[in-house]
Amino acid sequence: MTVVAADVAQARAAVCDLARHTPVLPSQTLSERCGGRVALKAENLQRTGSFKLRGALSKLASLGAGCERGVVAGSAGNHAWALADAARARGVPCEVFMPAQAPIAKVDGCAALGAVVRLCGDSLEDCFAAATARAQEGGLAFVHPFDDPDVVAGQGTVGLELLEDVEDLAKVVVPLGGGGLSSGVAIAVK
């Protein structure tokens, strides 16, 4: 499925009640170094500390009744915590598979939100495999952290806010991990 601007707009309705509209803050240091006005979107002020909540909420909305048995994810931390928060807010059971060396704060954050946390393996691939197997075995919905059109659309809501908050937006620089955020933002600002 190809994600289009209308999908990002639809995702906004699914995330706006819980995800914060985070501020765009000027950076004097970066502006001086780049020779132009540079502003930073403060997604670190989002619930659970990252943009990942947006994708998780969008995915839960798209699943509808398809997630009443629960959701499951493999994650090193941010996606797990975001899914745990979204699932709690929507009254959906949640399980997360995290590497054995996952940050304690993220493991505890997930557990505090009611997620069943399972530490397994040393890699994200181990966690994906365990979460996928659990989804199949228990009839749960697997929520991928970035390789999912609904997640990409939800993360694209960052781009919609940039368009609203930054006058004469000329360039957008997005960090790249799995590509969900950069894809969603590109679709929104295009």
Image: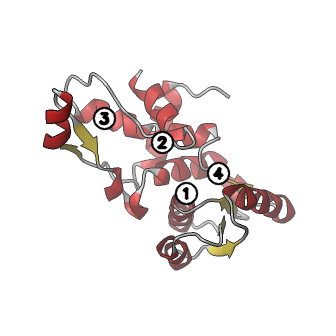
Q: Earlier in the sequence, mark 2 or mark 1?
A: 1
Assign a secondary structure to mark 2. Answer: helix
Q: Residues within 10 Å of mark 1 (few under 14, many from 20)?
A: many
User: Spatial distance from mark 4 to mark 1, Cα to Cα?
Assistant: 19 Å
Looking at the image, do the residues carrying marks 1 and 3 touch, with CB atoms under 8 Å apart?
no
In the rendered structure, find residue 79 and report the number of the disc placed on it: 1
Q: Give me the residue at 43% from left, 50% from top.
A: 51
User: Spatial distance from mark 2 to mark 1, Cα to Cα?
Assistant: 12 Å
Q: Give me the residue at 67% from left, 59% from top.
A: 74
Q: Residues within 10 Å of mark 3 (few under 14, many from 20)?
A: many
Identify the residue position indicated by label 2 in the image: 155
The quarter holding residue 98 reads: bottom right
Looking at the image, do the residues carrying marks 4 and 3 touch, with CB atoms under 8 Å apart?
no
Q: Nearer the viewer, mark 1 or mark 3?
A: 1
Looking at the image, do the residues carrying marks 4 and 2 touch, with CB atoms under 8 Å apart?
no
Looking at the image, do the residues carrying marks 2 and 1 touch, with CB atoms under 8 Å apart?
no
- Nearest the viewer among 109 and 101 is 101
* Above or below 61: residue 140: below
Q: Earlier in the sequence, mark 4 or mark 2?
A: 4
Residue furthest to the right: 137
Identify the residue position indicated by label 3 in the image: 162
Assign a secondary structure to mark 3. Answer: helix
Assign a secondary structure to mark 4. Answer: helix
